Amino acid sequence: MRILCLSTEFLKNKFILDLEDAEEEHSGENEIPLLAHFLQIRDVLKAKDITASTPIRLKNCLYNAISALEECVVLSEKREPRKKKDGPMHGYTLAEHWLICKTRRLLVQTTRKLTATADAVIPGMTDMAASSSSTSFPVIPRPNSQNFNHLRVEGFYDQSKTIFDRLGKRGKGFHEIGIVGIGGSGKTALAQLVFTQSNWRYFGGYRIWICLFRKLSGDVKFKKMIKDMLKQCKAVVDDEDFDAAAVDDEDYDGVEVEELLENLGKALKGKKYLMVLDGIWDINIDWYFKLKDKLKSVSGDGDGDGYGHVIITSRLPHKARMMVGSHNLYHMQPPSRSMELIWEFYVILGMLEKYKLKLKDEVIEQCDGLPLAMHTMGAVIGDQILGVR
């Protein structure tokens, strides 16, 4: 309980100090979006004492607030400087407006949680602690021929080729790429496409998929992650389309992290492998450098037939930059194909029939090139307008 109290106090102070830095660096006409909401959270935190009886949900609220602040700072840095006559939301794309709206709702919920009493139950809100402490890693399952539809990502083939070209040009040894972009831009979809297209490139080796989305607790369970990697190495020999969650954990019970990491190194040594870490969202990324040190030590300097490739995805470019270096970042681009030509969207728009001309342009504009917005809008049209879903 004392450890929880200390870590919560640390996060409280971190948020307050990060907000002070953001105010100093982005003041006046270039202040960060949603500043008033962040200031409100700061005032609530300053008036709140952290004790042993402080509910665990406060810690998760702080992770939410810190991550939201990081995103808003990134948005502010990307935006062109405003003039006095410009409104507070000037300079943002429609996609960024959409992200800001989602963040505003999160901050409102966070403020309500912070001001609620320890025993209060807030209707309509999900306890973030449940998701943060979940024992199941694969929120998005390991992509395979059964659960991944290539037709949904037709607009990403050019970008997947770019990823393969960048990995191929670097030769053998250990190499890494960080795919970054705002929420809904298609980072996971691109990683899934690369993963499912890469079987022949890593023939006789391993392809490992670890989903971290959304580990807001900032505390990745490194031991569990390595277990998942070892299970995939063990099972992929027999069945490329296996379900990692179904593999028995008993082989690794009672084994410490260092030994598990050593076993992972032995499994990958001299092999070709692709490892995808999807959805990096962590305050503490020390675990990644421990993993990278081991992978680099077994991938060598290019001697032999083995080589190791790691792809991470994150909506936080500064975190990805810390992990893989600025020269290894890949920034998401809009899909190369027109949205109305992408299969799922084409079907939905075609079903609008007489309403098509009235809604098509508006729907495409509202999606603003975001694949996730496209699929969400397609589901809304199909369900609420056409009644076919």
Image: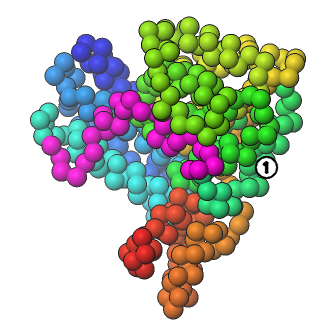
Looking at the image, is 240 positioned above or below residue 349? above
Quadrant location of the C terminus in the rendered image: bottom left
The stretch of residues the image draws in magenta is 121-147
- Left/right of residue 338 with respect to residue 362 in the rendered view: right
Q: Can you give x and y, in whole percent of width and height, for residue 60 in the image? A: 32, 33
- Label 1 amino acid? Lys
Q: Can you give x and y, in whole percent of width and height, for residue 43 in the image? A: 26, 37
Looking at the image, is 215 positioned above or below residue 346? above
In the rendered image, which residue does mark 1 sit on?
Answer: 161
| Residue drawn at x 15%, y 43% as measured from the top left | 121
Looking at the image, is 3 positioned above or below residue 68? above
Q: Nearer the viewer, residue 310 or 368?
A: 310
Q: Answer whether residue 284 is visible to the viewer in this image.
A: no
| Residue drawn at x 29%, y 19% as measured from the top left | 4
- Left/right of residue 33 with respect to residue 179 in the rendered view: left
Principal secondary structure, stretch drawn in magenta: loop
Tell me the SS state at disc 1. Answer: helix
